[in-house]
Image: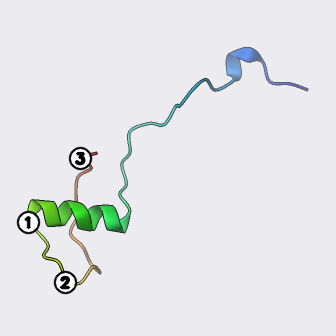
Amino acid sequence: MSIHRSLKVKGNIAGKKNVLKRFERVDQLIKEGRLKPGDQVLGLPKTKVNI
């Protein structure tokens, strides 16, 4: 049985990204000056998504 054409997903439906991976958070914190290279990456402060 096939899916009705009105129910098929068309194109890229990716919504707004609301979670960053650890390396993205580290990069963003370094750019903001809130983290220095060499600092510990455990227990990072929360960040807003700016992508």
Which is nearer the N-term, disc 1 or disc 3? Answer: 1
Residue denoted by label 2: 38
Which residue is drawn at the image coordinates 20% and 69% (left, top)? 45
Residue denoted by label 3: 50
Which is nearer the N-term, disc 2 or disc 1? Answer: 1
Which residue is drawn at the image coordinates 23% and 84% (left, top)? 40
Residue denoted by label 1: 33
Could you give the CA–CA distance between mark 2 and mark 1, rounded to whole angstroms?
Answer: 13 Å
Q: Residues within 10 Å of mark 1 (few under 14, many from 20)?
A: few
Quadrant where the N terminus lies? top right
Location of residue 36 in the rendering, given as x and y in whole percent from the top left corner: 13, 76
Question: Disc 2 vs disc 1: Cβ atoms closer than 8 Å?
Answer: no
Question: Disc 3 vs disc 2: Cβ atoms closer than 8 Å?
Answer: no
Location of residue 42 in the rendering, given as x and y in whole percent from the top left corner: 29, 81
**Seen in the image, is 16 located left or right of residue 34?**
right
Could you give the CA–CA distance between mark 1 and mark 3, rounded to whole angstroms?
Answer: 15 Å
**Seen in the image, is 37 located left or right of residue 20?**
left
Residue 34, quarter of picture: bottom left
Callout 3: helix, strand or loop? loop
Which is nearer the N-term, disc 3 or disc 2? Answer: 2
